[in-house]
Image (cartoon, rainbow, N blue to C red):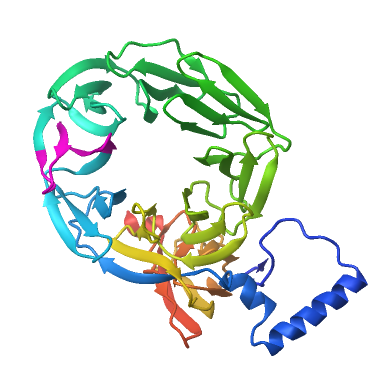
Amino acid sequence: MVEGLCVARSAAQPTYHALAMKTPRRRHRRAVITVLLLILGGSPAAHANDGLPSHSWQRLRTQQLAFAGGHQPQLLVDGRRALVFGTYGNSWYAVDTATGTVSQHSGALNLFRCGRALCGYAYDKVGELDARGQLVRPVDVGDHVMGAVGGRSSIVVAWTYSRGRTALVGIDRKARRIVWRKRTPVPSDLVVAGRYVVYRPAANQLQLLELKTGRTLAPYQAAAQMLGLQTSDRSIVELGRRTLITSEIASGKRTVLRLAHTLEPGQLLLLSASSAYALTGKKGHRKRLVRIDRQRGSLAFSVRLKTREDQAQLFLHRGWLHLLSSDTLYVLDAQTGQLTWQWNTAAKEIGFPNATGVSFVLHHDGRLEVFGPSRASQPMQPFVLRGRIALNTRPKARFAQSPVAGLPCRVGHFPCRTDAAGRFVVRGRARGELVIDIKTPYEINLPQPIALKEGKRVYDVGVLPLYTYSDCH
């Protein structure tokens, strides 16, 4: 991808960050392979972008759920149901993954797992949900519930807020009573790890509580320059710039694994028995997905992505990595990191049902997209998208420089900047839809995501009005 002042071009190039120097013999061999591929009906670029011939992906269907508005909707996959929640109106939705049937329920605003049970909370009540999706004899905790988590036991830990104070509350959902309450600062990274509650009261500190009694254990000193944190039933795993630290909660034993490479700031996304996956890279720069061997500390692969976002969601499913970041869904080989498929989407949440090969991604407006493996892969669509940013009213004299010139824009994962007149043009190849994002200190009306259509190449979003502070006061 070549970035210009107002034009960004997408060039078909390998995904990996390191490329070997090509000798004349290797160039000749590459030319012969290119000719053979063209004779067989395809180009190397098409094969590199469209995925492995033996395994591809496609969008199976899209469902629109009606929302009353409010919070960012969230997604939880429970068995063979995709559960969508986090809205006003005290309602949530369950989508059958096999048939696509949608059912609406009430009685809980937010959902979470507690052992084998599905639980939820709404306002000041926490409880288990029955087969119809209703809260069964919920426990009234007295204060407004801001969040809740559960482990493999019957104890639910809720974070409450009342009169400017926050607290953690331990609730026995079977006995239907509160077993402990503890005043704390606003908890960060609140999780239940086996017999313990782990949260972060400060940037370089972790606090542990006993799950059943709420008894406070000695504060745990976190690693300096920690890039990410993951917990399991028995351990806490931290990723530093040069270390991978595993701490056994019960015994206090700590294992420090020195990494062979220094990692940039990032996010620890996923842990498996043998590997750690992380998204690393400086703020505002393109990110890398890295896989770290947990036995040797070596870098198994480092894949450069087109995303510049600091946060991402990653799932490991049947040997494939599904990464959702920066309005793009990537599918990569879990062992080699080879990018096999990608789809542009405005979705913010991703989830997988049990024992199925499909994935669900959720948009902020309630659209639920379903993706699955397929032999036929939709090709990348070439596109040209253009538009212009203009002031809504004539600016006052205090605007010495035009506020529409040189604004950073992002169309999907293609960056560019506006010219002196506020125009922007982006050329590239993508699947799905393109999300337009423009960074400006003023207010601007951005269009809805642009769906790419087969056979259509040019997309014009017209004039996007920019509102200065003088328009609002």
The residue that appears at 55% across and 15% down in the rendered structure is 253
The verdict on residue 246 being magenta is no
| Magenta stretch prevailing secondary structure | strand
Q: Position of residue 146 (x, y in %)?
A: 25, 33
**Residues in magenta?**
113-135
- Whether residue 405 can be seen here: no
Residue 262, compared with residue 81, is above or below; it is: above
User: Where's residue 170, x and y in %?
Assistant: 24, 21
| Farthest-out residue, right | 24
Q: Is residue 209 left or right of residue 330?
A: left
* Visible residue check, residue 355: yes
Write down the quadrant of residue 138 in the picture.
top left
Which one is nearer the viewer's eye here, 54 or 192? 54
Queried whether the magenta region covers residue 126, the answer comes back as yes
Residue name at image x 25 percent, y 23 percent: 164
Q: Is residue 156 above or below residue 116?
A: above
Quadrant in the picture for the N terminus: bottom right
**Front residue (pair 116, 279):** 116
Direction from residue 418 to residue 437 in the image, left or right: left
Q: Position of residue 403 (x, y in %)?
A: 51, 61
Residue 196 sits in which quadrant?
top left
> Residue 365: where, in percent of width, then height?
29, 61
Q: Quadrant of residue 150?
A: top left
The residue sitting at 27% across, 32% down in the picture is: 148
Please tell me whether residue 169 is drawn above or below residue 473 in the rendered image.
above
In the shown orientation, is residue 44 left or right of residue 370?
Answer: right
Residue in front for this viewpoint, 352 or 76: 352
- 432 on left or right of 424: left
* Residue for point 15% across, 25% down: 141
Q: Does residue 1 sit above or below 247 in this rendering?
A: below
Q: How many marks?
A: 0
